Each structure stands twice: as structure tokens, then as C-alpha cells.
Image: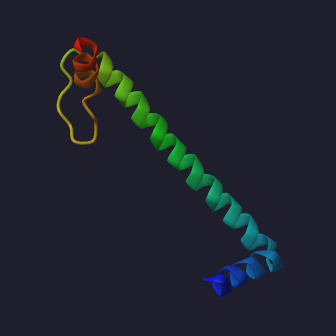
Amino acid sequence: MQALLDSVESALNSDPDLAGLAIAWLALTIWGAFTVVLAYCSRLRERADMANPPQHPLFLDLKGRHEAQSKN
């Protein structure tokens, strides 16, 4: 693993174009992940405002859990 990291470091240090592409790829990957997280959080807030949101496996039922905790 160390040899692989050393070869990648050597390639990035010797080729500025490759280093620029690697930085651009990393920035786009981080931006994309951040966008997905923001979109998911936004959708969770929208579903929390709905009276009866449709069931979906990707979205947790936080409203029901919150109501159950407030009764205790």
C-alpha cells in the first residue's frame, strides 16, 4: 500500500497537469457528496411538514418517533 501511495505521490509531483486533474476530480467529488447530503436533508424537512407523507425506504419516519417521545 505504501508503494502505491509513493508512486501516486511521485506521479502527481512530476506531472502538474495530472495533479490539476486530480484536484479538480476531488473537488467535484466532495461538492457532489455535499449536494446529495443537502438535498436529502431538504427532502427530510419537506416530509416532516407533510400531514401524511408516503412511506419510502430511504426516508426515516422521524415525525412518528418525535411524537412518541413527546408523549412520554
Q: Is residue 35 left or right of residue 40?
A: right
Q: Quadrant of the N terminus?
A: bottom right
Q: Residue furthest bottom?
A: 3
Q: Is residue 65 left or right of residue 11?
A: left
**Relative to residue 58, is residue 41 depicted above or below?**
above
Q: Position of residue 60 (x, y in %)?
A: 27, 34
Q: Position of residue 4 (x, y in %)?
A: 64, 84
Q: For this rendering, which residue is in front, 28 or 33? A: 33
Q: Residue at x 64, y 53 (%)?
A: 27
Tally the marks: 0
Q: Residue furthest front?
A: 72
Q: Is residue 8 left or right of residue 71?
A: right
Q: Residue at x 75, y 69 (%)?
A: 19
Q: Residue at x 42, y 28 (%)?
A: 42
Q: Position of residue 37 (x, y in %)?
A: 47, 40
The quarter of the displayed image where residue 69 is located: top left
Q: Residue at x 24, y 15 (%)?
A: 72
The quarter of the displayed image where residue 43 is located: top left
Q: Position of residue 36 (x, y in %)?
A: 46, 43
Q: Is residue 32 left or right of residue 16?
A: left
Q: For this rendering, which residue is in front, 24 or 5? A: 5
Q: For this rendering, which residue is in front, 33 or 6? A: 6
